[in-house]
Structure formats: C-alpha cells, structure tokens
Image: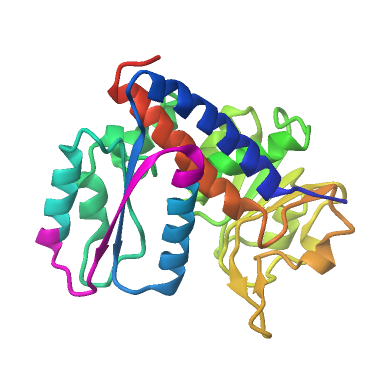
Amino acid sequence: MQIINGKEVSANVKAGVKAQCEELKKQGITPGLAVIIVGEDPASQVYVRNKERACEECGFYSKKYTLPENTTQEELNNLIIKLNNDKSINGILCQLPLPKHLDDKEVISLINPIKDVDAFHSENVGKIMIGEYNFLPCTPAGIIELIKSTGVEISGKKAVIIGRSNIVGKPMAMLLLHENATVEITHSKTEKLAKEASSADILVVAIGKAKFVKSDMVKEGAVVIDVGMNRDENGKLCGDVDFEDVKDKCSFITPVPGGVGPMTISMLMKNTLTAAKIQNNIK
C-alpha cells in the first residue's frame, strides 16, 4: 500500500499556477479572487483562511468579504452583482453552507458563470455533462489529479463512487466517465452496498460518515480516495474510510487529513487562473 500525498501533488499544481501567474503579471494582469463568508461557522473560517493563504502563495489578488450571520438575501445578492461587475475580480466564491435563512441556489445562479470558479452554476454543470467546460468542480478535479499521480490508468477501470452530492458524487462520475472509466454511483439506498464497493478498481468515498468503509468493501489492490472529513470518538480528524482496517488491502489510499483536502484548494487556484485568462482573452 502506498499513501497518495495530497500535499505534495497540491504543491506541484500551485507551483504551476504561480509560474503562469507571473507570466500574466508581465502583461499587467493579476488574477483576483473574492471570497464571501456569512456568519461564524468555524470550519468555513478555516477553509477561507486556507484559500487566502493559497492566493498569497500563487501571487493572486484576493479579497475577503465577512458578512454577519443576519445578512439579508438582498444584501448578499447585491454584493454578488457588484463583484460580477468588478474587473479586478476574476473568481467569486461564496463559502457554503450559508445560514439557514439564505438561499444558496439563488446565490449560485447569480454568479456570472465565467467567474464561477467553484463550477456550481447550472451553466457550468451542463458544460461538464457534455465535456465542453471551462472549469471543473474543485474536489472532483483534484481527485482526478491524485489518481493520475499514482500512475494508475483510469481508462477501462471500474470506478465506484459512494455518495451522490452535487458537489462531489455526481460531477466525480462525469469526470471519471470523461477519463473512460466504467462508473457506478452508489448511496445510502443502494442494496448490497458492500458488494458493489468491493467490485471497484477505483473507489471514491464521499458519504460523510466516519470510518464507514471497512476492508470487506474494498477490492484487493484498489485505489481508494477518501473525501470524508469527520471526527472520530476521540475527536480526532478521520475520513469516511477506516484507514487502519483498509490500508493493507488497497494499492493506493489518500490519508485524512493531507489527501483530498489540499487538492480542492489548489484546483480553486487553477480555476481562478483560467477565469483570468478567459476574461482577458488569453488562450
């Protein structure tokens, strides 16, 4: 078993982005990312700090908008419209989840698709479906990079995804399909889930349940990607895969933390760079 080092792969992606950013700066262009955070959610604050740090590393211009918990839909919508019209901002990211009284679908649909660096807007989702996209959702795109970093050929392999969210499960299926894998999506209502999971050459787990996947759900020699971020009974960070139970059965596995997490942010940087190029007509 080999551990897939997300920090290492992520650092390589960011180094590439930084080099391209330096080239853009010679033409007077600095990629700009605006991050909006509403309320005091501690996990969201950690993510936003990490995004700010990554912007700094890559040489981007970044602006953070911290809005109070009681922000109205109209106030949030007006900020999105303002950022859509701000030439110095190439990417807009609204940190989810939002407080319960706000409608995230409304917010996402307001973001100009060419500034939607999370690739959540329905126009961008449709483009991913037909394979003609500008941006890919950050977590699934990062997972593809991680799998490729192992040297394992995706084409022709059976890939099973546990989880069907709009953020990971569904787009993950599309990206693996674009890489010519045979793809199956499973979820909480799937019958004989363990049997389905154990047929996978590539297993992507994004179900949100701590240590859910045990060794009986993993095929000998499989590549296992753990998207989960949970706390175990001792309050320690852990994934959706029981790492200790599974590690001896698979060929490659991502750790938690230090696997998928760092990739999500580096792919966000890549998307922001792409957005800056598109908006400035640079091929």
Residue occupying the far bottom of the picture: 234
Q: Is residue 220 above or below residue 276?
A: below
In this rendering, position of residue 92 left or right of residue 146 = left
Describe the colour scheme in one phrase. Answer: rainbow
Q: Quadrant of the C terminus?
A: top left
Residue 20 % position (x, y)? 49, 25
Image quadrant where residue 149 sits: top right
Residue 82 % position (x, y)? 14, 45
User: Residue visible at 14% across and 45% down?
Assistant: 81
Q: Is residue 23 above or below residue 144?
A: above
Viewer-proximal residue among 271 and 32? 32
Viewer-proximal residue among 206 and 67? 67
- Residue 216 in magenta? no
Q: How many marks?
A: 0
Residue 105 % position (x, y)? 26, 54
Viewer-proximal residue among 8 and 60? 60
Residue 202 % position (x, y)? 72, 44
Any part of residue 139 in sight: no
Any part of residue 169 in sight: yes
In this rendering, position of residue 69 left or right of residue 217 = left
User: Residue visible at 56% across and 38% down?
Assistant: 14
User: Residue visible at 10% across and 60% down?
Assistant: 74
User: Residue visible at 71% across and 64% down?
Assistant: 241
Image quadrant where residue 33 sits: top left
In this rendering, position of residue 88 left or right of residue 51 = left
Q: Which residues are magenta?
A: 55-75
